Image (cartoon, helix red, strand yellow):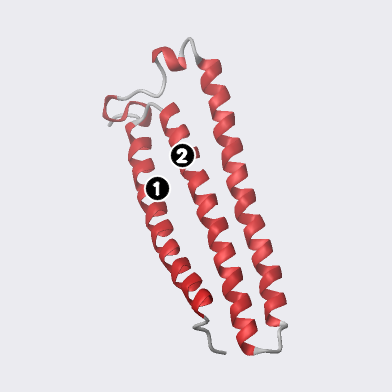
Amino acid sequence: MESESEFLGYAREGGALHGELAWLVHGLEWVATVVDLLAIAILVLGAVRFVLGFVLAELQRDGVARVRGINRQRVALGRYILAGLELLIVSDIVHTALSLAMIDLVFLGLLVVIRSLISFFLDRELEAVKHDLANGDITA
């Protein structure tokens, strides 16, 4: 059985990128890690803002105002999630470009498909909530 580093004829090490330009690979790995951390920070910031906004909305006495407030927070959280997912996709692309393994390319494809589906359906839901907020189609 082939080792992981030689999966489908692709070796992780070798070539100019990992030979003479190893310093560049190392630097780009750091860049991808920073992008990962930024994506996580965006997701956490969105979650914190959502929780605070949700609590404030729940304190509303008027039921319609409460629902509108929660829906506004849902839209804002969705924007943070979409931004975080897009940065994570960028990071995954950089990691895969630096790896010379075919299995990493397959993994990237699956991640991009999953994240794109999540983004698509989340965006559709956010549009529906924004439409309801704009048209006042909210009941307590």
Q: Nearer the viewer, residue 124 or 81?
A: 124
Q: Quick one: quadrant of the C terminus?
A: bottom right
Q: Quadrant of residue 64?
A: bottom right
Pinpoint residue 4: horizontal percent, then vertical percent: 36, 31
Quadrant occupied by the N terminus? top left
Q: Quadrant of residue 74?
A: bottom right
85 or 98, which lies in front? Answer: 85
Q: Quadrant of residue 50?
A: bottom right
In the image, is residue 130 above or below residue 95? below
Disc 2: CA contacts within 10 A as few (<14), some (14-19) or many (>=20): many
Q: Position of residue 135 (x, y in %)?
A: 49, 78
Q: Which residue is mark 2?
A: 92
- Along the viewing direction, whichever of 26 and 55 lies nearer the viewer: 55
Q: Position of residue 137 (x, y in %)?
A: 49, 83
Image height of 61 relative to 83, above or below:
below
- Mark 1 surroundings: few (<14), some (14-19) or many (≥20) residues within 10 A: some
Q: Residue at x 68, y 81 (%)?
A: 58
- 138 relative to 95, above or below: below
User: Could you tell whether 139 is left or right of 17 in the image?
Assistant: right
Q: Earlier in the sequence, mark 2 or mark 1?
A: 2
> Which residue is label 1 attached to?
111
- Spatial CA distance of label 2 from label 1 is 8 Å
- Circles 2 and 1 in contact, beta carbons < 8 Å: yes
Residue sticking out furthest to the front: 135
Q: Residue at x 52, y 81 (%)?
A: 136
> How far across and how far down the image is residue 23, in percent?
56, 16
Tell me the kind of residue under disc 2.
Asp
Element type where label 2 sits in the image: helix
Name the residue type under label 1.
Answer: Leu
Instruction: Give the side of residue 137 with respect to residue 4, left or right.
Output: right
The residue at the point 63 percent across, 76 percent down is 69
